[in-house]
Each structure stands twice: as structure tokens, then as C-alpha cells.
Image (spheres, rainbow, N blue to C red):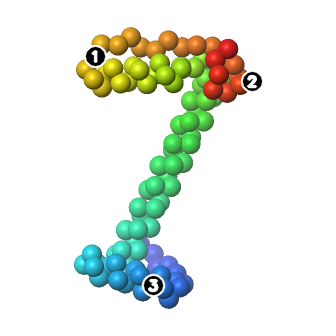
Amino acid sequence: MTSTTSLKLPDALKATIAQVAASEGKTSHALMVETLQSAMDDALARQRFHADGEAAWQDSLRTGTVYRAEDVQAYITARADGAQAARPQAVNLDPAKPGKQA
């Protein structure tokens, strides 16, 4: 389902949209719809990223544990290189100093 929406665009932006659309073999309308969809997809991904980060932080506060970044990086690097690697060990979180272990 689609609905009609009216946008007032500055003349310079309208001209740029027309130029880019023509160079891509699209109508201005198609270019604007694709651009808006892409911007909304990006915005939703950012919102999910922030929500995931907040959930992870709340989990760290709940469990009182975190992982040292350097341990996680070493583990991921070793695995990416095809090496066997022990999983990083959790350390106690000091909630008064986010990012620091107790």
C-alpha cells in the first residue's frame, strides 16, 4: 500500500535529485523513495545497535561481570587466523567505573 506525501524541497536539492536520478537511469521519485528507505533502514539499525548495547550493559550490571577488550580481541584474532583459542574469562565489573574491572 502506498500513500501520497508532499515534500517542499529547496530548488538546489531538487536539481541535484534530478541530476543524480538521470545519471542512474531512475526517476526522481524512485531515487527519493530508495534514498528514504535506505535512511530508515540505517536509522533502525542504529536503534537496534543502541538497544543491544543497553541490553548488554544491563546484563553486565545484573551479572556483575564483563570481558576485557584485549582478551576478546586476542580470542577473535586467533579464531580468525584458524588457531584454537580458549574463550576469554569474565572478570568482575566495578559499576562505579564503567569499563574497568574490579
The residue labelled by disc 3 is 14
Q: Closer to us: mark 3 or mark 1? A: 1
Where in the figure is residue 2, as x and y percent of width and height?
41, 72
Where in the figure is residue 38, as x and y percent of width and height?
41, 61
Up/down of 97 relative to 40, above or below: above
Distance CA(mark 1)–CA(mark 2): 36 Å
Up/down of 83 relative to 57, above or below: above
* Residue 65: numbered disc: none
The residue labelled by disc 1 is 83
Farthest right residue in view? 96
| Residue positioned 27% across, 79% down in the render | 23
**Tag 1: Cα neighbours inside 10 Å, few (<14), some, or many (≥20)?**
few
**Tag 3: Cα neighbours inside 10 Å, few (<14), some, or many (≥20)?**
few
The residue labelled by disc 2 is 96
Residue 65 appears left or right of 22: right
Residue 95 appears left or right of 78: right
In primary-sequence order, the first of circles 3 and 1 is 3
